[in-house]
Image: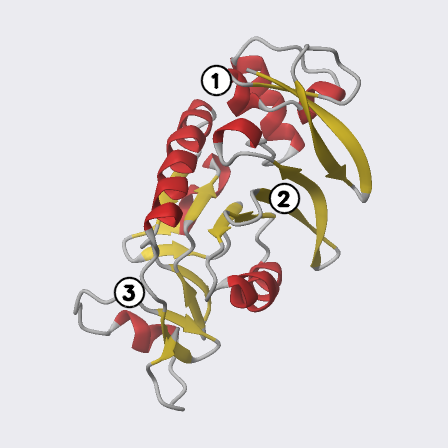
Amino acid sequence: MTTASAGVKLTSEDYYALPDDGQRYELIEGDLIVPPAPNLEHQGISGELYSLLKTAALSIGARIFAAPTDVYLSPQTVVQPDLLVVLREHAERMTQRGIEGAPDLVVEILSPNSSERDRQTKARLYAQAGVREYWIVSPEAKIIEVLVLRDGGYTVHLRAAGNLPRAQLVFLLQPDIRHQQLAHVGLPCAVDATKRSVLATLTGVNLELPGERTGGGERQLVQNGRAHNLIVSR
Protein backbone atom coordinates (compact mmCIF):
# COMPACT_ATOMS: atom_id res chain seq x y z
CA MET A 1 0.00 0.00 0.00
CA THR A 2 1.38 3.42 -1.00
CA THR A 3 0.42 6.88 0.24
CA ALA A 4 0.16 9.05 -2.86
CA SER A 5 -0.65 12.44 -1.32
CA ALA A 6 2.78 12.86 0.36
CA GLY A 7 1.50 14.50 3.54
CA VAL A 8 -1.05 16.72 1.80
CA LYS A 9 -4.53 16.20 3.23
CA LEU A 10 -7.24 15.93 0.58
CA THR A 11 -11.02 16.12 0.71
CA SER A 12 -13.62 13.95 -0.97
CA GLU A 13 -14.11 16.74 -3.51
CA ASP A 14 -10.39 16.64 -4.32
CA TYR A 15 -10.69 12.89 -4.70
CA TYR A 16 -13.65 13.18 -7.07
CA ALA A 17 -11.72 15.69 -9.19
CA LEU A 18 -8.74 13.35 -9.70
CA PRO A 19 -8.10 12.46 -13.35
CA ASP A 20 -8.99 8.93 -14.40
CA ASP A 21 -5.54 7.41 -14.85
CA GLY A 22 -6.63 3.79 -14.48
CA GLN A 23 -5.18 3.57 -10.97
CA ARG A 24 -7.27 2.48 -7.99
CA TYR A 25 -7.23 4.99 -5.10
CA GLU A 26 -8.79 5.32 -1.67
CA LEU A 27 -8.93 8.41 0.53
CA ILE A 28 -8.33 7.48 4.17
CA GLU A 29 -8.84 10.42 6.53
CA GLY A 30 -7.38 12.83 3.99
CA ASP A 31 -4.51 10.60 2.84
CA LEU A 32 -4.65 9.36 -0.76
CA ILE A 33 -3.80 5.65 -0.74
CA VAL A 34 -2.86 3.37 -3.63
CA PRO A 35 -3.88 -0.18 -2.60
CA PRO A 36 -1.92 -3.02 -4.22
CA ALA A 37 -3.63 -5.06 -6.90
CA PRO A 38 -5.47 -8.09 -5.46
CA ASN A 39 -4.13 -11.56 -6.21
CA LEU A 40 -5.98 -14.30 -8.09
CA GLU A 41 -7.24 -16.06 -4.94
CA HIS A 42 -8.70 -12.79 -3.68
CA GLN A 43 -10.44 -12.17 -6.99
CA GLY A 44 -11.79 -15.71 -7.14
CA ILE A 45 -13.36 -15.42 -3.70
CA SER A 46 -14.73 -11.98 -4.52
CA GLY A 47 -16.38 -13.28 -7.67
CA GLU A 48 -17.90 -16.26 -5.88
CA LEU A 49 -19.26 -14.13 -3.05
CA TYR A 50 -20.64 -11.60 -5.50
CA SER A 51 -22.50 -14.30 -7.40
CA LEU A 52 -24.00 -15.78 -4.25
CA LEU A 53 -24.92 -12.47 -2.64
CA LYS A 54 -26.44 -11.12 -5.84
CA THR A 55 -29.11 -13.83 -5.88
CA ALA A 56 -30.17 -13.07 -2.33
CA ALA A 57 -29.86 -9.29 -2.63
CA LEU A 58 -31.94 -8.97 -5.79
CA SER A 59 -34.72 -11.11 -4.34
CA ILE A 60 -35.28 -8.51 -1.61
CA GLY A 61 -34.76 -5.44 -3.79
CA ALA A 62 -31.23 -4.74 -2.57
CA ARG A 63 -28.24 -3.86 -4.77
CA ILE A 64 -24.76 -5.35 -4.61
CA PHE A 65 -21.62 -3.71 -5.98
CA ALA A 66 -18.03 -4.88 -6.33
CA ALA A 67 -14.79 -2.89 -6.33
CA PRO A 68 -13.98 -0.44 -7.69
CA THR A 69 -17.06 1.40 -6.38
CA ASP A 70 -16.45 4.66 -4.53
CA VAL A 71 -18.09 4.91 -1.10
CA TYR A 72 -18.11 8.44 0.34
CA LEU A 73 -18.07 7.86 4.09
CA SER A 74 -17.12 11.40 5.13
CA PRO A 75 -15.64 14.62 3.67
CA GLN A 76 -12.17 13.11 4.26
CA THR A 77 -12.75 9.42 3.51
CA VAL A 78 -13.63 7.59 0.29
CA VAL A 79 -13.13 3.82 0.17
CA GLN A 80 -13.62 1.02 -2.34
CA PRO A 81 -14.76 -2.10 -0.45
CA ASP A 82 -14.38 -5.46 -2.15
CA LEU A 83 -18.17 -5.91 -1.99
CA LEU A 84 -21.05 -3.88 -0.61
CA VAL A 85 -24.83 -4.15 -0.34
CA VAL A 86 -27.34 -1.27 -0.24
CA LEU A 87 -30.88 -2.10 0.82
CA ARG A 88 -33.90 -0.82 -1.07
CA GLU A 89 -34.86 1.63 1.68
CA HIS A 90 -31.48 3.36 1.27
CA ALA A 91 -31.52 3.55 -2.53
CA GLU A 92 -31.06 7.33 -2.39
CA ARG A 93 -27.48 6.73 -1.26
CA MET A 94 -26.64 5.46 -4.76
CA THR A 95 -25.59 8.46 -6.85
CA GLN A 96 -23.76 9.15 -10.08
CA ARG A 97 -20.38 9.27 -8.37
CA GLY A 98 -20.86 6.24 -6.11
CA ILE A 99 -22.37 5.51 -2.70
CA GLU A 100 -22.98 8.60 -0.57
CA GLY A 101 -23.02 7.43 3.04
CA ALA A 102 -22.92 4.02 4.67
CA PRO A 103 -23.76 0.82 2.79
CA ASP A 104 -25.80 -1.67 4.82
CA LEU A 105 -23.21 -4.40 4.39
CA VAL A 106 -19.52 -4.20 3.52
CA VAL A 107 -17.27 -7.18 2.74
CA GLU A 108 -13.48 -6.97 2.77
CA ILE A 109 -11.28 -9.89 1.70
CA LEU A 110 -7.97 -9.86 3.53
CA SER A 111 -4.59 -9.98 1.84
CA PRO A 112 -1.20 -10.00 3.59
CA ASN A 113 -0.71 -6.27 3.03
CA SER A 114 -4.28 -5.20 3.84
CA SER A 115 -5.09 -7.21 6.96
CA GLU A 116 -4.18 -4.57 9.55
CA ARG A 117 -5.90 -1.77 7.61
CA ASP A 118 -9.08 -3.80 7.05
CA ARG A 119 -9.29 -5.02 10.66
CA GLN A 120 -8.43 -1.78 12.38
CA THR A 121 -8.57 1.40 10.30
CA LYS A 122 -11.44 0.41 8.02
CA ALA A 123 -13.40 -1.25 10.81
CA ARG A 124 -13.22 2.02 12.76
CA LEU A 125 -14.21 4.10 9.73
CA TYR A 126 -17.10 1.81 8.81
CA ALA A 127 -18.39 1.90 12.38
CA GLN A 128 -18.14 5.69 12.55
CA ALA A 129 -20.07 5.99 9.28
CA GLY A 130 -22.81 3.62 10.47
CA VAL A 131 -22.21 0.53 8.30
CA ARG A 132 -24.60 -1.93 9.95
CA GLU A 133 -22.69 -5.09 9.16
CA TYR A 134 -19.07 -5.77 8.20
CA TRP A 135 -17.84 -9.14 6.93
CA ILE A 136 -14.10 -9.88 7.07
CA VAL A 137 -13.04 -12.81 4.90
CA SER A 138 -9.65 -14.42 5.57
CA PRO A 139 -8.59 -16.68 2.67
CA GLU A 140 -5.50 -17.87 4.54
CA ALA A 141 -7.38 -18.88 7.71
CA LYS A 142 -10.53 -19.84 5.75
CA ILE A 143 -12.73 -17.83 8.11
CA ILE A 144 -15.62 -15.43 7.62
CA GLU A 145 -16.19 -13.05 10.54
CA VAL A 146 -19.55 -11.27 10.71
CA LEU A 147 -19.29 -8.02 12.69
CA VAL A 148 -22.51 -6.27 13.70
CA LEU A 149 -22.66 -2.58 14.68
CA ARG A 150 -23.75 -2.03 18.28
CA ASP A 151 -23.30 1.11 20.39
CA GLY A 152 -20.93 2.70 17.90
CA GLY A 153 -18.61 -0.30 17.57
CA TYR A 154 -18.50 -3.77 16.07
CA THR A 155 -19.29 -6.99 17.91
CA VAL A 156 -18.31 -10.36 16.46
CA HIS A 157 -21.73 -11.88 15.84
CA LEU A 158 -20.49 -15.02 14.12
CA ARG A 159 -17.23 -16.60 13.03
CA ALA A 160 -17.47 -19.48 10.57
CA ALA A 161 -14.47 -21.60 9.53
CA GLY A 162 -14.24 -23.93 6.56
CA ASN A 163 -13.79 -23.88 2.81
CA LEU A 164 -14.52 -20.43 1.47
CA PRO A 165 -16.76 -19.14 0.32
CA ARG A 166 -19.32 -21.73 -0.77
CA ALA A 167 -19.17 -24.30 2.04
CA GLN A 168 -19.46 -21.88 4.95
CA LEU A 169 -21.18 -18.75 3.65
CA VAL A 170 -23.75 -17.46 6.12
CA PHE A 171 -26.20 -14.81 4.93
CA LEU A 172 -26.56 -12.43 7.87
CA LEU A 173 -27.66 -8.97 6.78
CA GLN A 174 -30.23 -8.09 9.44
CA PRO A 175 -33.09 -10.07 11.06
CA ASP A 176 -35.84 -8.33 9.09
CA ILE A 177 -34.04 -8.95 5.81
CA ARG A 178 -33.36 -12.57 6.73
CA HIS A 179 -37.06 -13.06 7.42
CA GLN A 180 -37.96 -11.70 3.98
CA GLN A 181 -35.39 -13.89 2.26
CA LEU A 182 -36.44 -17.01 4.18
CA ALA A 183 -40.02 -16.40 3.13
CA HIS A 184 -38.86 -15.97 -0.45
CA VAL A 185 -37.27 -19.43 -0.55
CA GLY A 186 -40.15 -21.03 1.36
CA LEU A 187 -38.46 -21.65 4.71
CA PRO A 188 -40.32 -21.06 7.98
CA CYS A 189 -39.56 -17.72 9.63
CA ALA A 190 -39.17 -18.88 13.20
CA VAL A 191 -36.64 -17.07 15.38
CA ASP A 192 -33.98 -19.75 14.93
CA ALA A 193 -34.67 -19.92 11.22
CA THR A 194 -33.29 -16.41 10.79
CA LYS A 195 -29.86 -17.87 11.58
CA ARG A 196 -29.96 -20.39 8.74
CA SER A 197 -27.77 -19.89 5.73
CA VAL A 198 -30.16 -18.69 3.07
CA LEU A 199 -27.45 -18.62 0.46
CA ALA A 200 -26.61 -22.20 1.33
CA THR A 201 -30.19 -23.07 0.48
CA LEU A 202 -29.91 -21.23 -2.82
CA THR A 203 -26.64 -22.91 -3.75
CA GLY A 204 -27.37 -26.46 -2.65
CA VAL A 205 -25.13 -26.44 0.42
CA ASN A 206 -26.92 -27.13 3.69
CA LEU A 207 -25.72 -25.23 6.75
CA GLU A 208 -27.91 -25.98 9.74
CA LEU A 209 -27.99 -24.81 13.31
CA PRO A 210 -26.03 -26.66 16.02
CA GLY A 211 -27.98 -29.67 17.23
CA GLU A 212 -29.78 -30.34 13.94
CA ARG A 213 -28.84 -33.71 12.48
CA THR A 214 -27.95 -33.82 8.81
CA GLY A 215 -25.42 -36.61 8.63
CA GLY A 216 -22.67 -34.31 7.39
CA GLY A 217 -19.33 -33.33 8.85
CA GLU A 218 -18.80 -30.80 11.60
CA ARG A 219 -17.23 -27.37 11.69
CA GLN A 220 -16.72 -25.07 14.65
CA LEU A 221 -18.91 -22.00 14.91
CA VAL A 222 -18.28 -19.17 17.35
CA GLN A 223 -21.43 -17.14 17.88
CA ASN A 224 -21.66 -14.30 20.40
CA GLY A 225 -18.46 -15.55 22.01
CA ARG A 226 -19.59 -19.18 22.45
CA ALA A 227 -18.23 -22.17 20.53
CA HIS A 228 -20.64 -24.61 18.91
CA ASN A 229 -20.41 -27.41 16.39
CA LEU A 230 -21.82 -26.42 13.03
CA ILE A 231 -23.33 -29.33 11.15
CA VAL A 232 -22.46 -29.25 7.47
CA SER A 233 -23.81 -31.44 4.68
CA ARG A 234 -23.51 -31.22 0.92
Asked if residue 103 can be seen in this view, the reply is no
Relative placement, left or right, of 121 versus 63 is right
Relative placement, left or right, of 191 versus 105 is right
Circle nearer the N terminus (1, 2): 2
The spot of residue 163 in percent (x, y) is 53, 34
Q: Residues within 10 Å of mark 2 (few under 14, many from 20)?
A: many
Can you identify the residue that label 3 sits on? 24
Relative placement, left or right, of 156 versus 92 is right
96 and 133: which is toward the camera: 133
Can you identify the residue that label 1 sits on? 202
The spot of residue 195 in percent (x, y) is 68, 26
- In this figure, which colouring scheme has been used for the structure? secondary structure
Residue type at mark 1?
Leu
37 and 182: which is toward the camera: 37
Residue type at mark 2?
Val
Can you identify the residue that label 2 sits on? 146
The spot of residue 58 in percent (x, y) is 40, 27
Q: Residues within 10 Å of mark 3 (few under 14, many from 20)?
A: some
Asked if residue 126 can be seen in this view, the reply is yes
On-image quarter of the C terminus: top right
